[in-house]
Amino acid sequence: MNKAFDIAIESLASPGATAPAPSTSTSSPAASPHPRHPNAAPGKSFYLETFGCQMNVHDSEKVSGVLLGRGYRAVESPAEADLVLYNTCSIREKAAQKVFARLGDWKTTSQNKIIGVLGCVAQQEGEEIFERAPWVSLVCGSASYRRLPDLVAELESGGRRVTGLDLDTEETFETEITRRDNPFRAYLTIIEGCDYSCAYCVVPLTRGPERSRPSGSILSEVRRLAAAGYTEIQLLGQTVNSYRDPSAPKLNFVDLLYAVAAVPGIRRVRFTTSHPNDFTREIVQAIDSTPALCDHIHLPVQSGSTPILRAMRRTYTREEYLEKIAWIRAARRPISLTTDIIIGFPGETEIDFAGSLSLLDALQCDGVFSFKYSPRPNTPARDMPDAIPEEEKSRRLAILQEHQRLIQIARNDLLVGSQFEVLVDARHAGRDQWAGRTTSNRVVNFTSPRVNLLGEYVQVRIARAGPNCLVGEHLV
Ligand code: SF4
């Protein structure tokens, strides 16, 4: 799990958890019948590989919808496809390198194929991608996805190179069709872009300014998803709780949470990722009073040291963050907390690092996503003095992860003997176990005498606990 910004997390599973992340392949469950675009491309096929966070995963679901609507069919491997797309992540250097390695695979074999780069690397590198990989034909950042149908049409009619790199937009990316790859949890982006300017983060540069989606359109989609059988919705945004309805009801984020939770058929509503600055008591009160709002909050802190938070431009202090945690801990309903920490930000001293360790003790999180700082192009932190050597970052990261592992072991041990409702989303045939998640987003692996549980809500008693998951048995 590698992420160092608020666009949450490849998955909110704790590291090492055994339930699967949502599939990013385009091969899984059939989507509903797709109306064809008038200029569709029947017989053409596409392959789309996704890197990075849940926002990217969901963007890919919508991009797939656009292509299916044009008559394309999804195939299992890039070799079979007419159109090969990579939806990329540039949050860490390694992720960006991986994309260029993939593009390199096509250097001598791209004839008769259209190769495209989408997402953050596309936005960041722009037309330079054509220089580095001249066999690429499409480069499109996420803020321009609404233009994708036109860009694809241009390629279909013989265009050699097309780009969508405009960041100056007030629109969000909505599609008539979304190919949802996770049959149990439906992702739904409610806000795109980011108006913060954290010193280490490429998101404002790659995803553009903050744009919220009208509440009417969100709620219609939730109703459609409920009618299609989805019971769990995950609202997405880089700073999801900054949501501001651009349309007449002018719902704020909490109003929207209540409205989504009230849609008949919806049993679980999650949201990620929250920014501490916009995190209010009303969010906690909503969770406390509404069982359908999941009892889990992911609130990235990034450092336990106020001077480092200031250098990161995080807009809050350690004390202000802890004040918000006190609201969460004061709720009547126990709420699970997870966070993100960056290790080795420029200038981080031993004292600052000790502050992050002591913060973990104070927070008692059920999962922490921790990362070594890696400088990214065009970000203010890139040229900051006092860079921390890689070995030192690794040393601190190992210490922090072990510290948190012990916290999780102790916390999960307390859950042995308790009972949870689990939405079953996987089967581990080799271990003869099922897997799923609690409302608090804990991963539970369990045995059952039943033969098919996928998609069901079941009661599980916890018999054992590890740092990253619980193990139990189905209470039939
Ligand atoms: S700039 Fe925005 S997306 Fe990036 S870490 Fe800051 S709040 Fe999160």
Image: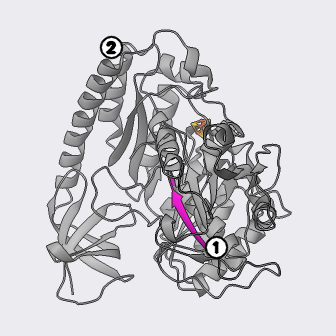
- The quarter of the image holding the C terminus is bottom left
Where is ligand 1, by quadrant?
A: top right
Instruction: Find numbered disc 2 in the image and state the secondary structure of the residue it sits on.
Output: helix
Question: Is 414 situated above or below 76?
Answer: above
User: Label 1 belongs to which residue?
Assistant: 178
Quadrant position of residue 421: bottom left
Query: Residue 226's spot in the image, x, y percent?
Result: 58, 82
Q: Please tell me which of labels 1 and 2 falls first in the chain.
A: 1
Question: Which residue is more in the foreground, 283 or 178?
Answer: 178
Q: Main secondary structure of the magenta part?
A: strand
Question: Which residue is more in the foreground, 394 or 280?
Answer: 394
Q: Residue at x 41, y 26 (%)?
A: 304
How many marks the image carries: the answer is 2
Q: Is residue 373 magenta?
A: no
Q: Residue furthest right?
A: 248
* Mark 2 vs ligand 1: CB below 8 Å: no
Report crowding for label 1: few under 14, some 14 to 19, many 20 or more residues within 10 A (C-alpha).
many
Question: Is 466 situated above or below 448?
Answer: above
Chain part drawn in magenta = 44-53
Tell me, for residue 350, which label it has, or none. 2
Q: What is the CA distance from the residue labelled 1 to the residue labelled 2?
A: 48 Å
Q: Residue type at mark 2?
A: Glu
